[in-house]
Structure formats: C-alpha cells, structure tokens
Image (cartoon, rainbow, N blue to C red):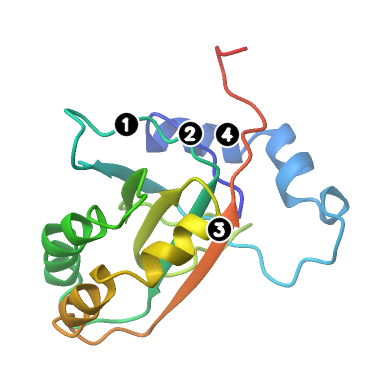
Amino acid sequence: MIQIDMMNAPDAEVLIQSDDFRRLILAESAYAAPIDKLALDVFETVHFPIPGHQTPPPRTAPLSFVVRYYGQTDDEAAFVRLYTENHPPILATFPGIRNVLCYLPLDWRSTEMLPDSSIILGNEVVFDDLDALNRALESDVMPVLRADGKRFAEFGFNTHHAMRRERIYANGED
C-alpha cells in the first residue's frame, strides 16, 4: 500500500497525471516483485479523538492495522454513518492505541489508466509495534467491537492487514 496525502482531489488529479507518478508508481519496474493488481482511490481522511488527548495526536507510531470494506451495500451512506458514529469511539478504547482514522471515498473515480478498488470505507488503527496490536486484539474491547460489527448492513467483503508504515518523503519537513 502506498499512501500519498494531498490537500484535495484536484491536487491528486494533477499528481496522477504527472510523469513522475507514472514512472514511480505505475511502472512495473518501480517494484521489486510483479504487480498483480494496481488500484487508485482518493479519500477524505478523518482522525478520531483518542482518550486523554485534546485533539487527535499526530500519526507517528509505526504500526497500522488497516481494514477496508468493499462491495455493494443497500445504503452506502447509512453504512458509513453507522460505522463512523459507533466503531471509532470503541476502537479508541484499545489499550496502547495511538490513532484511529477512517478513510471516506471522495466522489471521484479513477482514470482509465487505473481502476478504483470499490472501497466503501477504510479504517486504520495505529500502535507502537506488533506486540501492542496483538495485546489490543486480545483485549476486552474485541467483544464490544464484534457486537458493534453485527449491526453493520451487509456489504461485499473486507480485508485486514497489519503493516509497518515508513515515511519516505514529507513536503516541507526535514
């Protein structure tokens, strides 16, 4: 997963049309292994409060557990509303949690050079390391999350991936 944070969809559109993007992201030679599938999505990122913090803290811890929800649901807006109103506050109670984010697809669909992935909602919870994630997943918060998940409307499928995040470049930062 490559995440490029932009201020808005028009800036993202300019980026994906650039020669650098095509050379660094789209070219198969940019990757050490063969590319099975490449998709492009544009999201609004929503940071949720964490207990003990006045505002959501910066995302600096290196391990993320990333969940993506795909496919059809009867009412996508209702699905997203139920999820974002209920699930992030529960996730924020995980022991060792550093950040809770949701990714809401913008009303923008990819160009003919890259399809989008049909994500209806993304989620990311951030921890210091894999041990902290495992402790959270074994905590008493999990039964509460499962119960909340049973309230979700039917959707296609979801994926769950633990990933180590590494900042490669930050514009304007050393």
Residue assigned mark 4 = 15
Q: Quadrant of the N terminus?
A: bottom right
Asked whether the residues under the numbered discs 2 and 1 touch, taking CB atoms below 8 Å apart as contact, a structural biologist would say yes
Q: Mark 2: few, some, or many residues within 10 Å (few <14, many ≥20)? A: some
Cα distance in 3D space between marks 2 and 3:
15 Å
- Circle 3 — which element? helix
Asked whether the residues under the numbered discs 3 and 1 touch, taking CB atoms below 8 Å apart as contact, a structural biologist would say no
Most foreground residue, 156 or 49 = 49
**Residue 135 visible in the current orientation:** yes
| Viewer-side label of 4, 3 | 3
- Earlier in the chain: of badge 2 and badge 3, it is 2
| Viewer-side label of 4, 2 | 2
Instruction: Tell me what residue is drawn at x 29 percent, y 83 percent.
Output: 155
Cα distance in 3D space between marks 4 and 1:
28 Å
Q: Can you tell which quarter of the image residue 171 is in?
A: top right
Residue assigned mark 1 = 57
Residue assigned mark 3 = 130
The amino acid pointed to by label 1 is Pro
Instruction: Tell me what residue is drawn at x 18 percent, y 42 percent.
Output: 51
- Circle 1 — which element? loop
Q: Mark 4: few, some, or many residues within 10 Å (few <14, many ≥20)? A: some
Vertical side of 59 occupied by 155: above or below: below
Quick check: 143 left or right of 125?
A: left
Residue assigned mark 2 = 60
| Viewer-side label of 3, 1 | 3
Cα distance in 3D space between marks 4 and 2:
25 Å
- Circle 2 — which element? loop
